[in-house]
């Protein structure tokens, strides 16, 4: 069985050879995975190195909590990946980003309008929650496509606030 | 001693106070909002009563209801913790009127220190140096503030008169940007404290925030328990505190002078109970009074850890009318303590608060680690209250030992279900300026980056990818077995094997 | 410093050592039996290798395999913890032969102290008083022992030469019962240590078991870290340890004398690394050397807590060849520490071990509480290893504060799935002789009863009954709703209400 | 709904009146039970008094872990109880006790034989487990009815070791 795991937009091919062995990139590794009973907690020993992690499904992918850090991992089997290969990758021009409320709160300011061009890092919405004003910013340059809230409105967690369409880079270096 | 104390708070500090009461053999009463019915402080207390709906103004800020409940259950004292009603002179006075002991200073001391401008005027009169600013000028209009600003000099800070926790604060670099910043500061102060008054204060550059823990009884005895270094802040919110301050480590005369001044400041308002004098110290080792917090501080455990004094128990004893259990010369400091505030916020994403349910939590244990928390598996981080999940305090024989111990404790701490700022703390513990103790209050915002953490993350990207793949594979195989052809066995079984390292 | 250490142990002590290594920046290697694949020490270590099947003799006692693994993974030292191979001179020697540093004393010191009779002869020669007995007489036959007994006088104890942990020990009241008791002691010693040799020792009545922690480097520097009081025992198994000893609290000259003798005893065998000198102290304050444990002790955390020294880290440093980090005069003691050993055994049922799966565990946190454990939710208490679930250590400014803190920590500690001895400890913390520090090694077996605990239980019988009934009712209603008529709603809903106390 | 809860052979009648009230013995109490999510952990507030307990089913009854102590509670609804009322209670003469192994281990000694009369507290079996020799004793005087193990045998947890039939008391005081 062959899989491709994607983390931080890096791809790791994993081929499961038998009960003890996998091909990881070009290496053959000996692995031992043990679930710790009743929890999404796993002990993994890879060629003698020991790791402990929480692994649980989240929004179609997997979350891995390892040594204090969280990783979002998407896993596809090779065939599925092949079918999807021609698709655009995340930050390419025309790619749409959906800004969702990361927590419930009050939209105290929405300093953009629909159709507006915004720079990477520009404030899109200010959300008041947990007694703090939180600035939600553009992950890349683009234009505001569908603005779905107004200042003063309460929002639920994961409510869609607006969409952002990535700009075609203007100063591409080549 | 008191028979029964009502704790007018929630979360980790309510649990902390409940523990002190239990150790003193005092019965406890919890109060709770609807969101907190399952909370640790409710389950921990001997008695528990509902205050009202989840928003604080309908529950934990309802002083009238709290006094009513205290009466009905025959409590003889109220501990306010920090935040909520802790620095409300009217509540302290109402408690006294109702025949309840308020475990904190007199209402008059709270008033004197509560209005920052009045506080600064008071301590200045007592001979304590304050940061240059509009202290003692009363409520100023915008045009008055703008006129005053050049006399103080830029950069300066706009601060809310009734402020705290970074609310209603704005840094000002020049006169041009000042009018807008005054407006936004007033708006935030108005919405946070119901008081839009602001004042100006010189921005001390390269400043360190160093505060002294004060303890005073009702007989005029005032001592200090040494300092806490709180310069690791973000948006004026403390994130890491330690004692002793690495800045004062080799400057015992300065520490002693500051301690004397702190005691003076407390005496200036006839202070009783626990309090904190906050100073700014500039790079030339001049120190200025900033404000006094007339209550138990979030970061009190670092002082408890190095002095061995149980500050909450001592608060209760002096509130009951006992003398301080120790004199200044009996206070001994041992080793170094560091506290990390573990918040539900995502350091990789602009420290955005993360709400949701904590599905699992596994705190670190072992030597030199203390956890103060109010959360548990199943706890819902709600938007109603602050994002503090827990405080992790470590002790070491030396500051270096405390740092490495904090590293291992952070690595051990598992919190599943919400994003936390643990990676921020991990990065900080590996950052040269922190490790060497050379940082100021601007460090986090101006010089710190999460890049180191990102690098550390990258080291383990492969392992994360591998672990998720194997878990996904096993679960798929398992599903295939359950839903697939009956009797078909998985060919997959992970078993133990060992060989040389992969790195 | 060492690059990589192999920890030749399991459970809480393996985790304790792993933590010390992590704090020192040393890579760690765990070894495990089949029963321990999911264990905390395996997950915590940087590397982990299987030793073999679950029985200790096929895994944790396989010194050959351990040395082999250490070689393959390029470890440069081995920490044996306590138990298993910790006091096996042959293993220490084999490590040395294999070029591995054994983190403990030299093989010759282990040998000298390992045979109890030889040990007693050695220290007696160095001028240390020993309990009257057949020390130094070599292996005696039954008839020789019976002939010797009247010279020592009754009551006396039969002890295994290679013994420890109460195995192969028998109290003898008179000559008549002695032959049978010798037989059973020999049988138990044979099966526990592979050595049926026993010796006789005077039973000191009203005796307290007080031991001194020793730390020595390879340059001949030997210091002691003060005493531990370990008289709360059952069948010669320690259950509660504390430092300082309440018996020595007001007798500093005696403490100093004992400390000097302890250092002398260690010097007599040219000792290096951590070790413990056990004494019996009679009611007239005479003290006798009992034995030396040439390893880290289970109860080392109480000493760490009062002295602030990390004993495991110090073990590693001196094993690497560093000098002791402190001199005798630098050792300062602060406050009081108590440790309760939380075992999987049922105090209401003759302390029968309880095996099974721990389904939930919620350790106490907050000020002054330390937990050392190797278990977790999902952990299976197996019959292969000892029943220690965790060690809970509390610190207080005074012994009284430590006692009340232990009470609240015991109450907070939740372990679901197996029976534990927590009620025993709770009862002990309420028992007059314990609270006043007036107890001897016979106290648990001869004077202590669980009746107080039973009384405490009775207070809450009604609440237990009520809680179970409500839970049962809610679950039944829930079932009725799920499986009953569709759309039918439960009429049952628990909501918050408050009123005066029911008691 | 009426229940009878039995703990330590004491009986507590509980009548559920409505969502907020119960009759407990002769008292009417106000109660509030809340489950703490995902665990068999409950918060109970009774007339303002707060209690936390783990409550989980165990061998037909309920285990309650409360303030560090464990309680075994049996609950019957009143009707069931009425039907069972005439039955003999636990320790009465003729009552049979089944000695089960409390943990896996090795039976190192079985110092009784079938049919033997034993006193209360007398050792029935010595079981070696967790590196300790554990004495299993008679809970009351009686005779050994069915001895199912021999010294030297390994036993599983909860394996039946022997039965004990309670003696008719010889020195009843009346």
Image (cartoon, coloured by chain):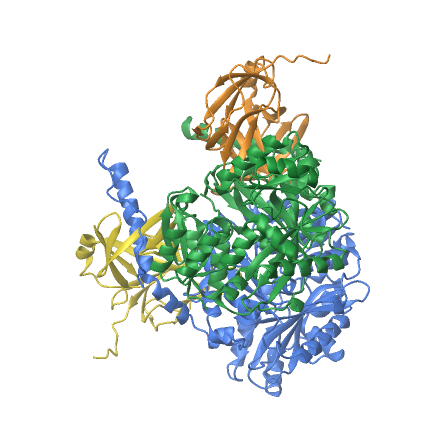
Chain colours: A yellow, B blue, C green, D orange
Tell me which corner region of the image, top left, top right, bottom left or bottom right, holds residue C100.
Answer: bottom left
Image mark count: 0
Residue occupying the far right of the picture? B219
Residue B117 point in image, percent of width and height: 68, 75
Camera-side residue of B269 and C327: C327
Residue B244 at x, y = what percent?
62, 71
**Residue B393 picture location, percent across and down:** 57, 61
Residue D15 seen anywhere in this rendered image of the structure: yes
Q: Quadrant of residue B316?
A: bottom right
Closer to the camera in the image, D128 or C34: D128
* Residue nearest the observer in this picture, C149 or B20: C149
Q: Relative to D118, does residue B391 appear above or below in the rendering? A: below
Drawn side of residue B117 relative to residue C344, left or right: right
| Residue at the (48%, 74%) spot, across then down | B445
The picture quadrant where one finds residue B371 is bottom right
Relative to A19, does residue C305 appear above or below in the rendering? below
Please tell me whether residue C23 is drawn above or below residue B158 in the rendered image: above
Residue B474 image position (x, y, % from top left): 29, 46
Give whichever of D14, B197 is nearer the camera: D14
Q: Is residue B321 above or below residue D60?
A: below
Q: Quadrant of the C terminus of chain A?
A: bottom left
* Any part of residue B103 in sight: no
Q: Residue at x 34, y 66 (%)?
A: A114
Q: Is residue C336 left or right of residue C320?
A: right
């Amino acid at each position: 069985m062959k899989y491709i795991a994607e983390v931080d937009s890096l791809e790791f091919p994993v081929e499961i050879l038998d009960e003890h062995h996998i091909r990881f990139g070009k290496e053959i590794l000996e692995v031992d995975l043990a679930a710790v009973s009743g929890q999404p907690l796993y002990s993994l020993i890879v060629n003698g190195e020991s790791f402990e992690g929480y692994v649980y499904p989240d929004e179609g992918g997997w979350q891995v909590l390892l040594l204090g850090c969280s990783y979002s991992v998407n896993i596809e089997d090779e065939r599925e990946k092949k079918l999807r290969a021609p698709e655009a990758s995340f930050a390419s021009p025309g790619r749409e980003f959906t800004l969702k409320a990361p927590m419930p709160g009050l939209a105290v300011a929405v300093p953009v309008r629909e159709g507006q061009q915004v720079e990477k890092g520009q404030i899109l919405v200010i959300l008041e929650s947990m007694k703090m004003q939180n600035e939600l910013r553009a992950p890349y340059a683009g234009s505001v496509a569908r603005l779905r809230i107004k200042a003063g409105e309460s929002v639920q967690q994961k409510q869609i606030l607006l969409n952002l369409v990535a700009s075609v880079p203007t100063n591409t270096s080549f | 001693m008191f028979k029964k104390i009502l704790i007018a708070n929630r979360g980790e500090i309510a649990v902390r106070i409940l523990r002190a009461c239990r150790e003193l053999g005092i019965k406890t009463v919890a109060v709770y909002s609807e969101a907190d019915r399952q909370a640790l402080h409710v389950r921990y207390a001997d008695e528990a009563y509902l205050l009202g709906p989840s928003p604080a103004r309908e529950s934990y800020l309802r002083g009238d209801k709290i006094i009513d409940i205290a009466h009905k259950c025959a409590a003889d004292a109220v501990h306010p913790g920090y935040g909520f009603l802790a620095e409300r002179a009217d509540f302290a006075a109402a408690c006294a009127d109702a025949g309840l002991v308020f475990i904190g200073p007199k209402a008059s001391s709270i008033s004197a220190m509560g209005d920052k401008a009045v506080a600064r005027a008071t301590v200045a009169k007592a001979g304590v140096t304050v940061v240059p600013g509009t202290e003692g000028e009363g409520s100023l209009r915008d045009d008055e503030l703008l006129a005053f600003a050049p006399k103080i000099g830029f950069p300066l800070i706009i601060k809310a008169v009734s402020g705290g926790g970074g609310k209603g604060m704005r840094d000002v670099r020049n006169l041009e940007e000042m009018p807008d910043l005054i407006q936004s500061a007033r708006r935030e102060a108005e919405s946070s404290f119901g008081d839009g008054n602001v004042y100006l204060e010189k921005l001390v550059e390269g400043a360190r925030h160093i505060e002294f823990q004060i303890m005073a009884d009702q007989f005029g005895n005032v001592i200090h328990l040494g300092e806490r270094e709180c310069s690791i802040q973000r948006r004026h919110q403390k994130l890491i505190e330690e004692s002793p301050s690495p800045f004062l480590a080799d400057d015992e005369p300065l520490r002693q002078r500051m301690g004397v001044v702190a005691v003076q400041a407390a005496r200036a308002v006839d202070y009783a109970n626990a309090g904190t004098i906050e100073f700014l110290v500039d790079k030339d080792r001049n120190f200025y009074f900033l404000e006094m917090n007339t209550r138990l501080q979030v970061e009190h455990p670092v002082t408890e850890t190095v002095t061995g004094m149980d500050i909450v128990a001592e608060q209760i004893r002096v509130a009951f009318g006992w003398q301080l259990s120790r004199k200044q010369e009996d206070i001994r400091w041992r080793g170094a303590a560091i506290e990390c505030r573990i918040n539900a916020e995502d350091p990789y994403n602009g420290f955005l608060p993360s709400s949701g349910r904590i599905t699992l939590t596994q705190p670190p244990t072992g030597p030199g680690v203390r956890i103060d928390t109010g959360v548990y598996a199943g706890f819902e981080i709600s938007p109603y209250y602050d994002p503090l999940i827990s405080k992790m305090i470590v002790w070491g024989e030396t500051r270096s030992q405390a740092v490495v111990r904090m590293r291992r404790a952070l690595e051990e701490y598992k919190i599943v279900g919400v994003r936390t700022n643990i990676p921020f703390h991990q990065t900080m513990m590996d950052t040269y300026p922190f490790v060497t103790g050379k940082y100021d209050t601007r460090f986090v915002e101006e010089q710190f980056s999460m890049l180191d953490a990102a690098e550390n993350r990258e080291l383990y990207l492969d392992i994360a990818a591998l672990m998720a793949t194997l878990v996904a594979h096993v679960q798929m195989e398992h599903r295939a077995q359950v839903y697939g052809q009956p009797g078909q066995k998985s060919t997959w079984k992970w078993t133990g094997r060992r060989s040389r390292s992969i790195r």
